[in-house]
């Protein structure tokens, strides 16, 4: 099987769907002439032309609103934010129109729109460019939230998101665009709302998603050398959350560690903790541990940033703690 980059998987997903359906188009800052800020739309302007690959002004509220209105009119827009940090400028359109229009219109309008772009930290980008927004959008009914961690999942899930008749938030990472992975050339999609057990184990369940899951893999490798078997679950979709896969795994391992690149208060790992303690409490042999960033804005200093972000050593310590080692 061929190996391609994450950015290429994203571009392929969009291009294949645009060939299939003429109502699909891509709009955002630098997506056309510049081939995308991270080259995730490379070659698309040449193939589809300026009517379907549209550069926009630096006005997230404006082009997010144009996308929502266009979706109401029968199109299927893909709206790229250069980073989801900038989506805060357009969040009114996402929350108050895209997510709510189907209910407010009594089912007269579906909003088949995808908002995509990078989330969370990406090195020394400092406080205002290093925030994780998965839990923010997942808090809003009417939105589906997808956070893939590798090229294969990214392509299959993005194609499903584009075909979905409801608004989807598709969150990537600037630090993953160059990641390589095996991706079939044949047509495929992946179901939204289904987690993937990336690594089977018996001693402890580790749940994560997005780029930070790489730290879980490193921890699992290190722990395996000490005879500790970790089951690593990649959520892939934050909302809807695959509760069944999480609960089934915890009932097998009896221990749970959650790794999430987000502030510790009111996040996805908090929701998973509530889920497990409410539906699998009697199966737990140790308190649940969730690992998050420090409860501060992201620092610029690389030394402080390394302390702020969770890493595989934090996972190793947490696993040993729930195993009482």
Image: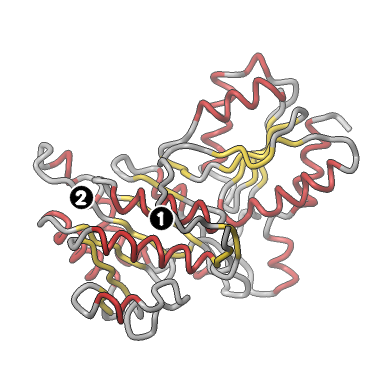
Q: Is residue 63 left or right of residue 151?
A: left
Could you tell me how many numbered marks the image carries? 2
Q: Residues within 10 Å of mark 2 (few under 14, many from 20)?
A: many
- Quick check: marks 2 and 1 in contact, CB under 8 Å? no
Q: Residue furthest bottom?
A: 33
Residue 22, by quadrant, is: bottom left
At 51% from the left and 57% from the top, the residue drawn is: 132
Give the residue pinned by disc 1: 170
Does the image show residue 289?
A: no
Report, in whole angstroms, how far the alpha carbon at label 2 lies from the one at label 1.
15 Å
* Residue 193 % position (x, y): 43, 38
At 56% from the left and 39% from the top, the residue drawn is: 196
Give the number of the disc on residue 201.
Answer: none
Q: Is residue 123 left or right of residue 13?
A: right
Q: Residues within 10 Å of mark 1 (few under 14, many from 20)?
A: many
* Residue 268 % position (x, y): 52, 42
Give the residue pinned by disc 2: 111
Q: Residue furthest top?
A: 282
Q: Nearer the viewer, residue 268 or 175?
A: 175
Label located before the other in sequence (2 or 1): 2
């Amino acid at each position: 099987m061929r190996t391609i980059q994450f950015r290429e998987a994203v571009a392929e997903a969009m291009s294949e769907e645009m060939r299939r359906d003429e109502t699909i188009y891509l709009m955002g800052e630098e997506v056309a002439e510049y081939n995308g800020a991270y080259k995730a739309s490379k070659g698309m302007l040449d193939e589809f032309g300026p009517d379907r690959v549209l550069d926009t002004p630096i006005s997230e509220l404006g082009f997010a609103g144009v996308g929502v209105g266009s979706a109401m009119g029968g199109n299927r827009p893909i709206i790229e934010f250069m980073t989801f940090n900038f989506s805060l400028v357009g969040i009114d359109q996402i929350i108050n129109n895209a997510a709510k229009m189907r209910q407010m219109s009594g089912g007269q309008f579906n909003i088949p729109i995808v908002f995509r772009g990078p989330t969370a930290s990406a090195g020394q980008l400092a406080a205002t460019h290093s925030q994780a927004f998965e839990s923010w959008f997942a808090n809003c009914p009417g939105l589906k939230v997808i956070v893939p961690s590798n090229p294969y999942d990214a392509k299959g899930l993005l194609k499903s998101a584009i075909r979905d008749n409801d608004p989807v938030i598709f969150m990537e990472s600037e630090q993953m665009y160059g990641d390589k992975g095996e991706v079939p050339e044949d047509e495929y999609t992946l179901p939204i709302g289904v987690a993937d057990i990336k690594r089977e184990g018996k001693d402890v369940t580790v749940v994560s998603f997005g780029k930070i899951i790489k730290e879980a893999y490193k921890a699992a490798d290190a722990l395996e050398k000490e005879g500790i078997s970790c089951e690593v679950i990649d959520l892939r979709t934050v909302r809807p959350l695959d509760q069944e896969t999480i609960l089934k795994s915890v009932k097998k391992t009896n221990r749970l560690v959650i790794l999430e690149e987000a502030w510790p208060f009111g996040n996805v790992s908090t929701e998973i903790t509530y889920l497990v303690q409410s539906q699998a409490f009697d199966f737990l042999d140790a308190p649940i541990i969730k690992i998050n960033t420090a409860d501060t804005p992201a620092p610029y200093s690389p030394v402080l940033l390394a302390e702020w972000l969770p890493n595989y050593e934090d996972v190793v310590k947490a696993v040993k703690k729930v195993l009482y080692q």
